Image (cartoon, rainbow, N blue to C red):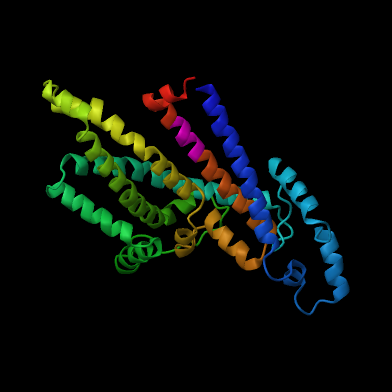
Amino acid sequence: MLTLIVQRVLLSLVTLLIVSVVIFWATEVLPGDVATAILGREASPRSLERLREELGLDRPAFERYVDWLAGALRWDFGTSLARQDQAVSELMGVRMRNTFALAGLAALIGLPLALALGVVAGLTRDRLPDLLVSTLALIGQSLPEFVVGSLLILIFAVQLAIFPAVTLVNADAPLAEIVPSMVLPVATLVIVMVAYIQRMVRSSMIDALASEYVQMATLKGVPRRRVVLRHALPNALLPTINAVALTVAWLIGGVAVVETVFNYPGIGRLLVTAVGDRDLPLVQALGLLGATIYITINLAADLLTLALNPRLRTMARP
């Protein structure tokens, strides 16, 4: 068991290292020149050369990668090229707070709702509650995030004028001032998340109810409620752990589309802005942050599945 955990952790670290190389290389081969993007096309060759030396762009790529990775381990990604008076870590810090608040609220509402609806749909297979929940989930899963967000803006911001359509406060404003602008983005994320997770929980619940151990418990006269809660439900939720982990990583990593639609000051929108400004240090840092979040949460989901699944624990024993 311990050996398997160590292997998973080491594999995650190796994966993160490979991703860091890919991120650094991908930003290196982007077309254009950073110095020209900063100084403009009218800059003299001497000024461009001097700026490249200041930014270290004249050094070999491997040396710059090692320095960048060492700085990343210290949470030091250098200075933003588009905002040269600010450190990349400072720019990311306040945006991470906003995205974590948005994702946390969406997960707090969406995950219990998705699990409950999935269980209800699985228990009432092919009956009215199942048909209703599954139809709504299919519609929600079929609509892209920007369509869902646009519909919510049209209904609740334009026609009913209940909530603001976009976020107008600064990124570093207190969360209490941002909360009113979080309602529609959170609703958008919840709709998309519930539609995805609910369908997986429903399928797992149906499979669990049709399994031999559940049928055997039913034949032995075990009460229906106990069969569902003690036997079917725990085994139905196990396969959905990774799906939930991916969804949470998707939320925390910054949903660029949703944050852009609502002008929400999170790391997703910051990434879009950084790409447009060709702010390579910021793009690299945000890419590495997103990869770290995905890998960490998936590692946690794997370890949780391993701990909760007796069959996997047995297979892990020598």
Can you see residue 199? Answer: yes
Q: Position of residue 264 (x, y in %)?
A: 49, 58
**Along the line of sight, which residue is nearer the eye, 229 or 214?**
214
**Could you tell me which residue is drawn at 59 percent across and 48 percent down?**
289
**Could you tell me which residue is drawn at 63 percent across and 47 percent down?**
18
**Along the line of sight, which residue is nearer the eye, 133 or 62?**
62
**Along the line of sight, which residue is nearer the eye, 18 or 59?**
18
**Numbered-mark total:** 0
Q: Position of residue 49 (x, y in %)?
A: 86, 68
Q: Position of residue 168 (x, y in %)?
A: 50, 62
Q: Position of residue 17 (x, y in %)?
A: 65, 44
Left or right of 84 in this view: 171: left
Span highlighted in magenta in the image: 298-304
Query: Which quadrant of the figure has residue 155?
Result: bottom left
Main SS type for the magenta part?
helix
Q: Is residue 179 above or below residue 3?
A: below
Q: Is residue 226 above or below residue 125?
A: above
**Could you tell me which residue is drawn at 41 percent across and 56 percent down?**
185
**Could you tell me which residue is drawn at 50 percent across and 46 percent down?**
100
**Along the line of sight, which residue is nearer the eye, 290 or 61?**
61
Q: Is residue 300 magenta?
A: yes
Query: Which quadrant of the figure has residue 11?
Result: top right
Looking at the image, the residue that sits furthest to the bottom is 42
Left or right of 63 in this view: 4: left
Looking at the image, the residue that sits furthest to the front is 318
Left or right of 109 in this view: 134: left
Left or right of 81 in this view: 91: left
Can you see residue 91? Answer: no
Q: Is residue 278 magenta?
A: no
